[in-house]
Image (cartoon, helix red, strand yellow):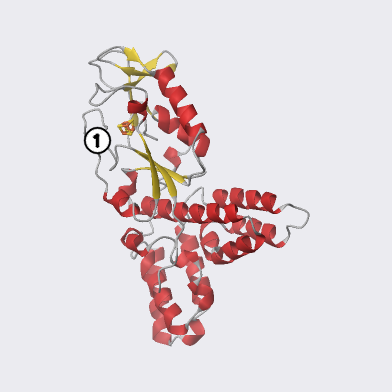
Amino acid sequence: MKTRQFSRPRIVISKCIEFDRCRYNGEMVPSEFVRRLMNYADFIPVCMEVEIGLGVPRDPIRVVQVGDALRLVQPSTGKDVTELASSFSSSYLDGLPEVDGFLLKSRSPSCGIKDVKVYPMGEKVASLTAKESGFFGREVMLRFKDLAIEDEARLINLRIGEHFLTKLFTLAEYRQINAEDGMGALVDFHARNKLLMMYYSQKELKALGRLVANHEGLQVGEVMTRYRNHLRTAMARPPGCGSGVNVLLHAFGYVSSDLNPEEKAEFLDALQKYREGKLPITVAVGMVRTWIARFDQEYLRQQTFLQPYPNEFLDVMSNDACVGRDLWTAIRP
Ligand code: SF4
């Protein structure tokens, strides 16, 4: 199956991940994932701690509990940068162009989206049991929770990586269509993303379909805004394993009459093993992809579900076994 054309996602990234040696100790965080993504996405790097004048290298800052409030403090100097951090975060995020996602440094008191240690006041003290977001990360989560947001440590988990990439490339493509401002482009987008939306949310797929079919009386801009909101709702959470089976069975229906009994049995077996968590979804997806070429199946060829992000990342998806643990609840406000 040929690689489809992808729109380039626009992603705000913690500058210390692959872009600059701006960590407190003058180091940078290496990320193979980000290096690969650089070929397909446009990054907007930012380092809050440098922007508020803390310099590199610098003594570390911490999230500190003072009464009921959380403050951002540099214990070695006693400097409190809470107000600086808050006003920088607000003005920086106010000034951003439309973006598709954020990739932030894990556990940082500035950029972290979860698992940031909280300390009592004082320099040589142990952390409290509570975990929080960093000051910049929290503002991002409050304002942009519908976008693709992750930290670089969580991306090591392959299911999280797969969901992040799928959402990122889908939102990026929709952003481009929005700019073109035409109903024809929206109808085309909807047709190509039908199986993907079926995978993510049957309920939102129906709402999207109704919007595209019955938009009389609404301005095109209003239809597109409503469509974008439903699209983001559909992708707010990763799809369950059961819906992957349903969508693959649906795709199978387009080619099954051309397959021999052995091929059919092999496919259904791969699906069953995916359902049981014994095989990644890619095994069944790979079979459908080979049948698209063999039977010149145009409807399936255009479906983003079968190629939601560039092939270079397929090894991310290839390890996506169907495990039930919810990996997202803890990072959503
Ligand atoms: S985690 Fe954020 S604030 Fe800290 S060095 Fe990286 S970019 Fe700068």
Number of disc labels:
1
* Horizontal and vertical percent position of residue 93: 48, 33
Going by the image, does 101 lie left or right of 187? left
Query: Can you give x and y, in whole percent of width and height, for residue 55 in the image?
Result: 28, 24
The residue at 57%/62% (across/down) is: 189
Expressed as whole percent of the image width and height from the top left, the position of residue 266 reads 38, 78
Q: Is the residue indicated by label 1 positioned so its CB lies within 8 Å of ligand 1?
A: no
Which residue: 44% across, 56% down?
166
Residue placed furthest toward the front: 180
Residue type marked 1: Arg
Can the viewer see residue 149?
no
Can you tell me which quadrant of the image ligand 1 is in? Answer: top left
Camera-side residue of 14 and 267: 14
Which element type, helix, strand or loop, lies under badge 1? loop
Residue 287 is left or right of residue 75, and the answer is right
Q: Is residue 31 left or right of residue 291?
A: left
Residue carrying label 1 = 21
Foreground pick, 155 / 272:
155
Which quarter of the figure has residue 280? bottom left
Quadrant hosting residue 318:
bottom left
- Image point (36%, 64%), residue name: 311
- Position of 187 with respect to 169 (left or right) is right
The front one of 313 and 160 is 313
Q: Count neighbours of disc 1 (C-alpha within 10 A) and say few if under 14, some if 14 to 19, many if 20 or more.
A: some
Image: 142 above or below 65: below
Q: Which residue sits at x=26%, y=31%?
A: 23
Q: Is residue 241 above or below residue 96?
A: below
Q: Position of residue 64 (x, y in %)?
A: 35, 19
| The N terminus: image quadrant | bottom left
* Above-or-below relation of 283 to 175: below
Residue 153 in view: yes
